[in-house]
Amino acid sequence: MEGRINKVQKSNREPRVNRVAPANGNGEATPEVTRFLHQLVTEVARVHRGDSETAFPSNPCSPAELAAALPIWKRFIDLAVVTLLFPVWLPVMTLVALWVAVTSPGPIFYRQPRIGFKGRRFMLIKFRTMKVNAETHIHEAYLEHLIVSDRPMIKLDATGDPRLILGGKFLRATGLDELPQIFNVLKGEMSLVGPRPCTVLEFERYAPEQRARVNALPGLTGLWQVNGKNRTTFRQMIEMDIFYSRNISLSLDIKIILRTLPAIVGQFFDSVQPLPRSGAQPTPPVKT
């Protein structure tokens, strides 16, 4: 039994893609397409079974708490939008997967433990935008600096990050690397709208009052993302997320969803013309 478990775990860690030639003239699928479809089916199967990849305990939450954070109308919007936009996001995900496979040998997807609702840990899924085995201590040190300082949360991508794969900056600026989190939404670990799920390291550095931001289910987009995001400070992000967690409503979610695309466009242009790092930006008004 132990040998079989080790064999299964090893096979789950082995998916890798190498540089290969495009599709041949017989119309056969390229290895990149085959690999992506295989991983896509695997993720869908996990969602259907309700499997969890977390190798650590999660904090329990009551059904009443979960119902308040994920009411029926919110879950309905999540499933309806994901289903209706299936013909859009699946081809886009396929193209992004092919790009990652061709430009950077290594796994297509990147999984990382994040903090979800009420401090529960889950495995977040995204497209890999960094080279395999890239160092993370630089990002961790920069994150600690943003937490204690009152400066805009400009990403390291703005000044150029050698750890990124070819096109990685574009994928991150447009949010395309976050598309696989649709599977997290389907599993009920995330919602379309909510605070961005923070890392375990970041959560450990929160002050007690700042941890109130996890009282809402994490989301693909949120109040912070459509109110300046990289132009805001860490403190402002926390305040917006706590405000959202205390004022969840259908109208607020719809407003945030409608403002997400313009916010992504603005974020992309910010990445082309990075904001100055000196001094804090004025506090932007929170639009609801």
Image (cartoon, rainbow, N blue to C red):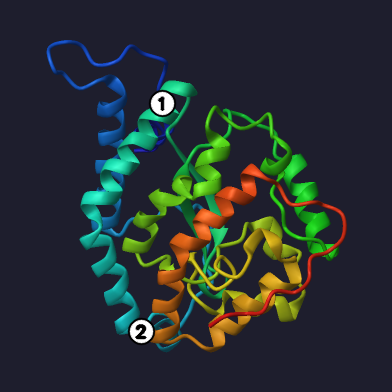
Q: Secondary structure at mark 1?
A: helix
- Would you place residue 156 above or below residue 67 in this image? above
Residue 92 visible at all: yes
Judging by the rendered image, the residue that carries numbered circle 1 is 101
- Asked whether the viewer can see residue 16, the reply is no
Q: Which mark is residue 209?
A: none
Marks 1 and 2, the one that precedes in the sequence = 2
User: Alpha-carbon distance for marks 1 and 2?
Assistant: 38 Å
Q: Residue furthest left?
A: 26
Q: Which mark is residue 71?
A: 2
Q: Secondary structure at mark 2?
A: loop
Q: Nearer the viewer, mark 1 or mark 2?
A: 1
User: Percent position (x, y) of residue 181?
Assistant: 41, 54
Q: Is residue 169 left or right of residue 208?
A: left
Amino acid bearing label 2: Pro
Residue 8 placement (x, y as % from top left)? 35, 35
Instruction: Categorize mark 2 by other alpha carbons within 10 Å: few (<14), some (14-19), many (20+).
Output: some
Q: Position of residue 68 (x, y in %)?
A: 43, 87
Q: Nearer the viewer, residue 43 or 80?
A: 80
Instruction: Give neighbour class at mark 1: few <14, some 14-19, many 20+ (Cα, 10 Å).
Output: many
The three-letter code of the residue at mark 1 reads Ala
Image position, residue 91 (x, y; %)? 27, 41
Q: Which is nearer the eye, 218 or 23?
A: 23
